[in-house]
Image (cartoon, rainbow, N blue to C red):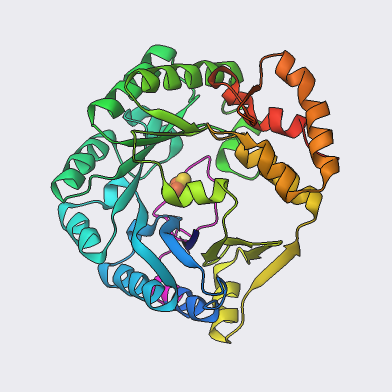
Amino acid sequence: MAGLYLHIPFCRQACVYCDFHFSTSLKYREPMVNAILREMELQKDFFKGETLQSLYFGGGTPSVLEHEEIVALVQKAFKTFRWAENPEITLEANPDDLSQEKLTQLKAAGINRLSIGVQSFRDSDLQFMNRSHNAEQSISCLQNARQAGFNNITLDLIYGLPNMDDEAWKDQVRQALNLGVPHISSYALTVEPRTALHHKIEKGEHRPLDEEQAARQFKILWEMLDKAGFEHYEVSNFARPGFRARHNSSYWQGRPYLGVGPSAHSFRAMHRYWNVSNNALYRKAIEKGELAQEYEELSEKDRFNEYLMTALRTREGLDLLEIEKTFAPEYSYYLMKEVEPVLGKGQLHLQNRRLFIPQEWRFHSDGIAASLFYI
Ligand code: SF4
């Protein structure tokens, strides 16, 4: 089933590693919400009647929105598209926004899954990353979220941080486990071009990141979470049974999704679309009743390579029958020839007509998938 993503392009401050699209000025929040409401209307035929199973507020920091704005966006989404019963409605939130009152309001607005940007339980890491919250707020907001009735909570953690040795990282994972959340997303710190972190490293203010440290800490992460009963169902995602993210899973399964808001991406059948990454240009177009969007038609090769890339990030891996059904026969022949040496190195396993990357190699999933691309 399909999913709807709403991009809320505002943050209280800029994290040093972030290359997402956002503004730290909240001045135009209200007209932006109006533009997002209007874009939903303009996109009402995108799914051609297909049923949606998930709504995801991402960004940016959607928890900067006022209660009435969230209610208006949820209501508009439900009025405009066709929905399955009990859809997953996720909102990304930063700990400093989650007061008890805010949590109660989110619950009342229909949000049934919270994605909390904890990133670290150490103040020194949070200061290094220029996060807007502190460690105490992370812990208290998780406890408050429970009290407000949220059971489906995921938190984000970052590994591979400078000055975080393996013992300190183990302690981070332990703290997350002690808080009893049913889902954890964890990413290696990366240096993206044009970010503050990139500039600092270029200027020699920070030493470059240590990839071996990140690989070690990834192994610590999945071993600890495995032991605690979490499924490592995607490279960066771990869930207790029954708590996999429905919205993100539909991306990995190649289902259609509509992204609304500046910089949001959409996908349906043979096409990928992306909105302009500029708040003013986005609003101006939408106010004129136009989409500020570009698109590309995906070739069979693009779709094949994309399927490899996303499927091999998941625990279930890639379905060889699906490849036979979906792509021309030359793709199956090509793949079977290319996987041979990778299977030999143990970087891929083949079981019940599925190819998947074992956990010990999953840190390198993207590289392994790219080595199998049809070129
Ligand atoms: S809060 Fe999230 S979107 Fe905003 S700057 Fe930080 S990482 Fe980026």
Return the x and y of residue 131 as percentages of the image width and height: 39, 42
Q: Residue 192, can we see it?
A: no
Q: Residue 189, can we see it?
A: yes
- Residues 313 and 124: in front is 313
- Residues 39 and 354: in front is 354
At 37% from the left and 71% from the top, the residue drawn is: 73
Q: Main secondary structure of the magenta part?
A: loop
| Magenta run includes residue 52 | no
Task: State the quadrant of the C terminus.
Answer: top right
Figure check: 276 above or below 142:
below
Please state if 310 lies on the left or on the right of 80 as rendered.
right
At 28% from the left and 52% from the top, the residue drawn is: 97
Return the x and y of residue 108 as percentages of the image width and height: 20, 64
At 65% from the left and 71% from the top, the residue drawn is: 293
Figure check: 320 above or below 152:
above
Please state if 104 lies on the left or on the right of 370 as rendered.
left
Return the x and y of residue 115 as percentages of the image width and height: 36, 46
Please state if 73 lies on the left or on the right of 289 as rendered.
left
At 58% from the left and 25% from the top, the residue drawn is: 362
Part of the protein shown in magenta = 7-33
Return the x and y of residue 154 as percentages of the image width and height: 34, 41
Figure check: 255 above or below 78:
above
User: Which picture quadrant has residue 123?
Assistant: top left
- Residues 224 and 317: in front is 317
Q: Residue furthest left?
A: 147
